[in-house]
């Protein structure tokens, strides 16, 4: 049985100091340019105290109230993805000396990160990307190194936004595994549990007191309340997977293509999308070159370029590729689902396309 502790709000700094003394750089939610984003923090006062977020299809807005809560918002704009799988990074550099000899230099970062406040959906996003980048035929050494250097403090959800649908994906607002520490915010602080040796060591060093029965009860109530707040749903997953795999010529693909801009926002905001491209950037004097990897999207026209041909020229084909991969064929490829129900693709779609509505139009239409 888990032992629960209480971390008062005024002791968050002690936790951050402890992690920094171990050599961790801390990332946590903070307010930047009218958004809540993960960024470097080293003090509790940088957290988004009193901020809440309002997210609907194609809409995001934050506002401040008088509540002394650091995690009154639902999810930050971006997930943990860019901390492990960088938007753009140099994979290697090559230089040529006077004699014309080439030397290759690997590019790596040994920085250790601790993330304060990872939402359960983002935790599952990491788990899915682990399948892609580590537990696959080829291991991505950079991702693996960052992953091994990560200390995770999960933050159970006590609210959700209107586009969340993790419950319908078979998940929940609880972080159930994959963290060092997990916390639930209540009045004056957090109810905390540890799930790793490092997490236990942290609790012990900070000499945290056990949470009272009232505090653990209140924490559980706060998280339980989220189940009933989520409104978006999709049908049961076996049905979704079966129908989608047989929906290649469904009229809905042409319908959504009339609305979609092919901007790729949905894929950039998604914690599990991993499409990328690679290119070389040689210097003008031809003495050095960098080999870069950067995020791409299955909505990019040239992402399907293969041996002289584009095989997803039509927008309807690119949207179909994204949705069927995410909600059906991903499981064949990685033995897991491709969506965690965070709702970011709905919020950040400039024309408000809602993936749950597109799925329902196809799958429920199949019943009629
Ligand atoms: S498909 Fe949409 S809801 Fe699902 S994980 Fe990606 S961004 Fe979140
Ligand atoms: S964000 Fe919306 S408009 Fe842009 S590619 Fe995705 S579905 Fe299309």
Image: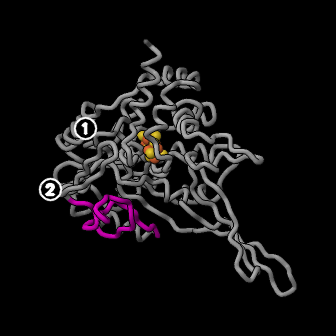
Q: Is residue 233 above or below residue 36?
A: above
Mark 2 neighbour class, 10 Å CA radius: few under 14, some 14 to 19, many 20 or more: few
**Which image quarter is the C terminus in?**
top left
* Residue, disc 2: 65
Counting residues from the N terminus, which is met first, the one under dot 1 or under dot 2?
2
Q: Find out whether residue 354 is within the magenta segment.
A: no
| Spot occupied by residue 78 in the image (x, y as percentages of width and height) | 41, 54
Residue appearing at x 64%, y 56% in the figure? 277
* Residue, disc 1: 220
| Spot occupied by residue 295 in the image (x, y as percentages of width and height) | 57, 56
From which residue to which does the magenta span run? 23-49
Q: Find out whether residue 25 is within the magenta segment.
A: yes
Q: Is residue 95 rendered to the left or right of residue 179?
A: right
Nearest the viewer among 200 and 129 is 129
Q: Is residue 79 rendered to the left or right of residue 186?
A: right
Residue appearing at x 24%, y 55% in the figure? 62
Say what secondary structure mark 1 lies in.
helix
Nearest the viewer among 278 and 142 is 278
Nearest the viewer among 318 and 294 is 318
Nearest the viewer among 191 and 340 is 340
């Amino acid at each position: 049985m888990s032992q629960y502790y209480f971390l008062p709000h005024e002791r968050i700094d002690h936790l951050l100091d402890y992690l920094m003394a171990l050599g961790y750089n801390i990332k946590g939610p903070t307010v930047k340019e009218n958004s809540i984003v993960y960024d470097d923090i080293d003090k509790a006062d940088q957290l988004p105290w009193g901020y809440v977020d309002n997210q609907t299809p194609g809409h995001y807005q934050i506002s401040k109230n008088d509540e002394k809560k650091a995690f009154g918002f639902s999810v930050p704009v971006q997930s943990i993805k860019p901390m492990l799988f960088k938007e753009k990074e140099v994979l290697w550099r090559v230089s040529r000396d006077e004699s014309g000899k080439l030397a290759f230099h690997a590019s790596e970062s040994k920085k250790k990160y601790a993330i304060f406040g990872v939402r359960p959906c983002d935790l599952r996003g990491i788990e899915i990307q682990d399948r892609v980048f580590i537990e696959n035929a080829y291991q991505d050494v950079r991702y693996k190194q960052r992953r091994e250097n990560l200390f995770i403090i999960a933050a159970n959800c006590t609210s959700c936004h209107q586009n969340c649908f993790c419950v319908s994906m078979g998940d929940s607002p609880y972080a159930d595994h994959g963290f060092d520490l997990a916390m639930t915010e209540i009045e004056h602080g957090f109810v905390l549990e540890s799930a790793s040796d490092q997490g236990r060591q942290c609790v012990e060093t900070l000499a945290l007191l056990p949470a009272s029965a009232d505090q653990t009860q209140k924490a559980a109530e706060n998280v339980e309340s989220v189940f009933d707040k989520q409104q978006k749903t999709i049908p049961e997953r076996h049905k979704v997977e079966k129908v989608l795999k047989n929906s290649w010529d469904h009229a809905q693909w042409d319908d959504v293509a009339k609305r979609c801009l092919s901007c790729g926002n949905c894929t950039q905001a998604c914690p599990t999308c991993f499409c990328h491209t690679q290119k070389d950037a040689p210097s003008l004097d031809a003495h050095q070159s960098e080999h870069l990897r950067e995020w791409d999207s299955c909505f990019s026209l040239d992402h399907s370029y293969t041996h002289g041909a584009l095989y997803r020229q039509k927008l309807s084909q690119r949207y179909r590729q994204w949705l069927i991969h995410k909600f059906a064929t991903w499981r064949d490829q990685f033995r897991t689902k491709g969506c965690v129900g965070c709702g970011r693709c709905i919020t950040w779609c400039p024309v408000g396309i809602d993936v749950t509505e597109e799925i329902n139009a196809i799958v429920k239409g199949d019943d009629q």
